[in-house]
Image (cartoon, grey):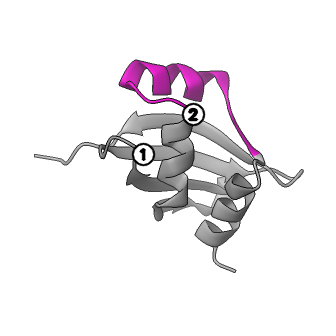
Amino acid sequence: MSKIGQIQRLVRNGLYYLTEHADDEAIGEGFDIYDVEYGILNGKIRRTWPRESKYEVVGSAIDGRFIGIVCRMTRTGKVRVITVYEDKPKR
């Protein structure tokens, strides 16, 4: 199974959590936990950090805005969301 498939399966099963930093960043950007979940479930991996086992997932939030999520899979089989941001196109 692909990495995005593994991450999405864990999220579908409720096996994920946001760090305090990710929660603060999500709120600051106008997102909530449902936006993060939705963004992961419809997202794609854009970038990886193999040495740290981190992944940047980009998808859409419930309101249609693009959301970026940096996460990793823990040894205990959960997805830890490290940070969340609105993914705006570069100009």
Q: CA distance from mark 2 to mark 1?
A: 13 Å
Neighbor class of circle 2 (other Cα within 10 Å; few <14, some 14-19, many 20+) is some
Start-end of magenta stretch: 16-32
- Check residue 78 for magenta coloring: no
Amino acid type indicated by mark 2: Ile
> In the image, residue 62 lies at what x, y percent?
40, 44
Q: Earlier in the sequence, mark 2 or mark 1?
A: 2
Pick out the residue farthest to the bottom: 1
91 lies left or right of 73: left
Q: From the image, tell me which residue sits under label 1.
A: 68
What's the residue at 54%, 38% (across, down)?
34
78 lies left or right of 39: right
Q: Secondary structure at mark 1?
A: strand
57 lies left or right of 11: left
Amino acid type indicated by mark 1: Gly
Nearer-the-camera pick, 15 or 56: 15
From the viewer's perspective, is residue 61 above or below residue 11? above
Neighbor class of circle 1 (other Cα within 10 Å; few <14, some 14-19, many 20+) is many
What's the residue at 56%, 56% (across, down)?
55
> In the image, residue 57 lies at what x, y percent?
49, 55
Quarter where residue 19 is shown: top right
Marks 2 and 1: CB-CB under 8 Å?
Answer: no
Q: From the image, tell me which residue sits under label 2.
A: 33
From the viewer's perspective, is residue 38 above or below residue 44? above
What's the residue at 57%, 29% (across, down)?
22
Q: Secondary structure at mark 2?
A: helix
